[in-house]
Image (cartoon, grey):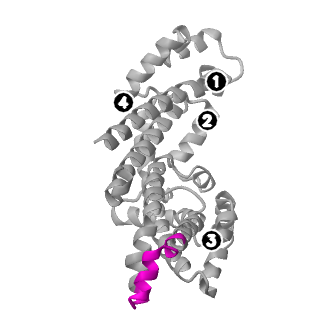
Amino acid sequence: MKYVSNRLLFFAITLFFALTLNFILPRLMPGDPAERILSRFGPNVDEKAIEAMRIALGGEHNKSLLSQYLDYLKNTFTGNFGISYLHYPVPVSEVLKNSIPWTIGLVGISTILSFLLGTFLGIYAGWKRDKFTGSGLLIFSLSLRAIPYFWLAMIFLYIFGYRLGWFPLSNAYSTKEVLSGIKLILSIIYHAILPGITLIVASLGSWILTMRNNMVSVLAEDYITLAEAKGLDDRYVMVHYAARNAILPSITAFGISLGFVVSGALLTEIVYSYPGVGYQLYRAVLSQDFPLIQAIFFFVSISVLLANLIMDFVYAFLDPRVRG
């Protein structure tokens, strides 16, 4: 019970500081959002129009910082994230409702596939650490980790999208015609293949290396030596003795990675013009869209903290020693 209460207290304190930073940081950015919105109509905008736009955006410039902060907390926990400056007059909740499914579908599935493949290869690399295949997988994983994933995305887009024409260059589905049903689903899958492969390959090296290092540490334990001395089958020892214990830290990291899914893959989404949360965040920062920035950061913070909390409980369930 003490372990649970400590975890929940840590969650509450961290969430408070995350929300406070989320309130402060956008307001440190220079410029006036109202002026930026009206600048699309030309350089000479009447001051009265700018003032009217400030009022339409909530009139926060007339309120004290404390009043703004209290309103921000109230609106955040009631789901009222305001109007998006970039997509004015569309509410922020509507923008996120249209973006989050794309990000979860692409980044979520890619993360799961990368974790499963990387864990399997990491188990094999750790078990065969003194063999050529184990050394080869180690070099392969280190090489993947050294490659910037946005550079990988641009290379894939240039080769397979532009030069060979195998995949589309942008968007999440075909916009050349109105699609529905199975045609729309196939178009979505087709457009997600290249960015999905990019995300899988970019994160694969970390999963392989993490699992491989965990395996090497576990294989030095006495119970592994005892299992081998009993004459148990090598595959049985690898899976039920070594991998079963070595995978615990990877499961924790995987849970936290799932929490980051909501934030999207910023640079990958930008390269492929994929309409996910990461791409919306990039456009929101350029446009000083404070409400959209704060809403995205809020969902990212709450997702990561919840994932971390859940994985703390899962880890404690799998390893009773953690509960003390």
Mark 4 lies on residue = 79
CB atoms at circles 1 and 2 under 8 Å apart?
A: no
Q: Is the magenta stretch mostly helix, strand or loop?
A: helix
Q: Which residue is drawn at 50% across and 67% down?
A: 114
Which-is-in-front pick, marks 1 and 2? 1
Q: Where is residue 211 in the image (x, y as percent from the top left)?
A: 52, 69
Which disc is residue 28 wearing? 1
Q: Tell me if residue 227 is in the magenta stretch.
A: yes
The amino acid sitting under disc 4 is Gly
Categorize mark 2 by other alpha carbons within 10 Å: few (<14), some (14-19), many (20+).
Answer: some
What is the x, y in percent for residue 72? 45, 22
Give the CA distance from mark 1 to mark 2: 12 Å
Circle nearer the viewer, 2 or 3: 3
Asked which secondary structure carries label 1, the reply is loop
Q: Distance between the residues labelled 3 and 4?
A: 42 Å
> Which one is nearer the viewer's eye here, 293 or 320?
320
Report the front residue among 318 and 151.
Answer: 318
Which tag, 2 or 3, sits closer to the chain's start?
3
On the image, the x and y values in percent for residue 12 come to 40, 33
Please name which of the two marks, 3 or 1, marks the residue nearer to the observer: 3
Identify the residue position indicated by label 2 in the image: 285
Q: Which of marks 2 and 4 is nearer the N terminus?
A: 4
Q: Residue at x 64, y 80 (%)?
A: 135
Which one is earlier in the sequence, the residue at label 1 or at label 4? 1
Q: Give the range drawn in magenta.
A: 217-235
In the picture provided, is 68 more to the left or to the right than 3? right
N-terminal of the two: label 3 or label 4? Answer: 4
CA distance separating discs 1 and 4: 24 Å
Q: What amino acid type is highlighted by mark number 3? A: Ser
Q: Is mark 4 on a helix, strand or loop?
A: loop
Say whether residue 92 is left or right of residue 51.
left
Element assignment for label 3 = helix
